[in-house]
Amino acid sequence: MSNSLYDQIYKKIRSEINNGKYSVGEMLPSENALGKLFNTTRMTVRSALIRLADEGYIYPIVGKGYYVNEKKFNLYSLDYDEINLMNFIIDETKLITVDIIKPDVDISYNLKLPSDSRVVLLRRLLFIDKKKVAYDEKFIPYYSGMPIDEASINQATLSELIANKESLFTTKKKLMIDFIESNKEINKILDFDKVQTCCRIQLTIHDDEGEPLGWSRLFCQMDYFKIDCKLLLNK
Amino acid sequence: MSNSLYDQIYKKIRSEINNGKYSVGEMLPSENALGKLFNTTRMTVRSALIRLADEGYIYPIVGKGYYVNEKKFNLYSLDYDEINLMNFIIDETKLITVDIIKPDVDISYNLKLPSDSRVVLLRRLLFIDKKKVAYDEKFIPYYSGMPIDEASINQATLSELIANKESLFTTKKKLMIDFIESNKEINKILDFDKVQTCCRIQLTIHDDEGEPLGWSRLFCQMDYFKIDCKLLLNK
DNA sequence: TAGTGGTCTAGACCACTAG
DNA sequence: TAGTGGTCTAGACCACTAG
């Protein structure tokens, strides 16, 4: 809890937006006017206004002023950590195989690689209470001299595997979640006695320029899938 | 593209963090030292540092300095707009009933209401290409004088219904997605010929103090469910 | 032409840290 | 006690807006 002047101004204006003193689309008093109103300088008022703008309450237009924003209501944050599933704690993982393979059509498409390139494939099983609940495949472009010993690879997330080569700060990630019918391979691996719908979580990691650095897909029993999200502030 | 001095400083330091000149946990030069380095004042350097801190690259400790942050890699943003499903466009919705009911256990729990209170229930069907793909229930605490005419209610989102009473800016929302076996009611409403797993999307809206203002649950055929998320910056 | 937000300067005092 | 980030002051010049 800060008691600084700009924090008080921030809270004052925020509550005035909330209780409708300033309504959506309306212009706030100028920085100078607010400075006089709160008996302070323009720069202090500005700290408050910049915070309100950061949080999406208002937006500035140069030469005009600050306007009250519409609240965007549809952006949520989702926590997905690659090791555990959404809300269940994986207590054991088992690396099945590590191979260097030629890409098939899906891999080629997702990693933007030609068919004669080579890709490292890591296959992994995830357990909860000794039960197989998910199966995971990770694909990373192979480069010569790449360390693929099991010791360094076991337990690693896709991000960590890529971190050997790239600075993590510059990478971008995309998550795609959908549902598919299990095929024979998945049925066998996860001990399904018949075809069943399962959840597929695909993760793609790109560099700054959008070049794919890695792709993974995880197939998971639906009983072990649950997503919790919280509303984000405007951005 | 800003060419301001603080923006140049921001980009310089950011790239130095990315290429490893400053590594995780390491302290940056002080604001004064950076001011001398870039031949400017402390306040200008500060603008750059505050932006880097906002974006999660660094964090300040009073009396010490700015430290390079670990990159958090597991927070994604998800767009869910209440009208359309995640990636499919609903081309028709149909309001089935609007009722004032006594809460059952689930409603009572989610809206924190006693069993003798009253709740407005809105039931709705969602169509894609003339096919029923989802069924939606919205629950809102009933207060006397509340307008529940169909004209004002049809098509409205949970947020919009609540906006009649509360300022939207102060509300918080939570999204919970999981999977359940369809029951008889859902089978009948969505024309399922047998029990099938379907996706349940629950949305709860709270006020500032965490008091529930509304709750909705949507049951959706799995073929019409897909989530796309993008990595968020550190927060 | 008067007013707006964006940037920048050159100071000041504060609570806090660590030797 | 010297140095740090947090806050605040009182100015300045700029590009831009709108009458």
Image: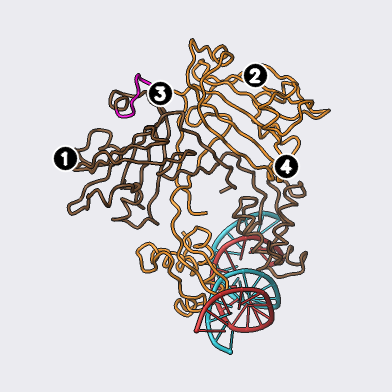
Chain colours: A brown, B orange, C red, D cyan
In the visual, does A137 lie left or right of B186? left
Q: How crowded is mark 4: few (under 14 residues within 10 Å), some or many (20 or more)?
A: some
Disc 3: which residue: A197
Name the residue tied to disc 1: A116
Q: Which of marks 4 and 3 is in front?
A: 3
Subunit under mark 4: B
Q: Give the range drawn in magenta.
A: A189-196
Specify whether residue B137 is painted magenta: no
Disc 1 to disc 2, how far (Cα)?
Answer: 55 Å
The answer to whether B208 appears left or right of B192 in the picture is: right
Q: Residue most toward the top?
A: B193
- Badge 1 density bin: few <14, some 14–19, many ≥20, Cα 10 Å: few
- Distance from Cα at disc 3 to Cα at disc 2: 30 Å
Q: Distance between the residues labelled 3 and 1?
A: 33 Å
Q: Do the residues labelled 4 and 3 touch (CB within 8 Å)?
A: no
Chain of the residue on which disc 3 is drawn: A
Identified by mark 3, the residue type is Thr
* Residue occupied by mark 2: B95
Give x and y (percent) for residue A70.
64, 44
Dot 2 falls on which chain? B
Which residue does the image show at 51% across and 36% down from the upper left?
A: A227
Residue type indicated by callout 1 = Asp
Q: Is residue A195 magenta?
A: yes
Element class at badge 4: loop
1 and 4 marks on the same chain:
no
Kind of residue sitting beneath label 2: Leu
- Residue B31 in the image, given as x and y percentages of width and height: 52, 75
Which SS class for mark 2? strand
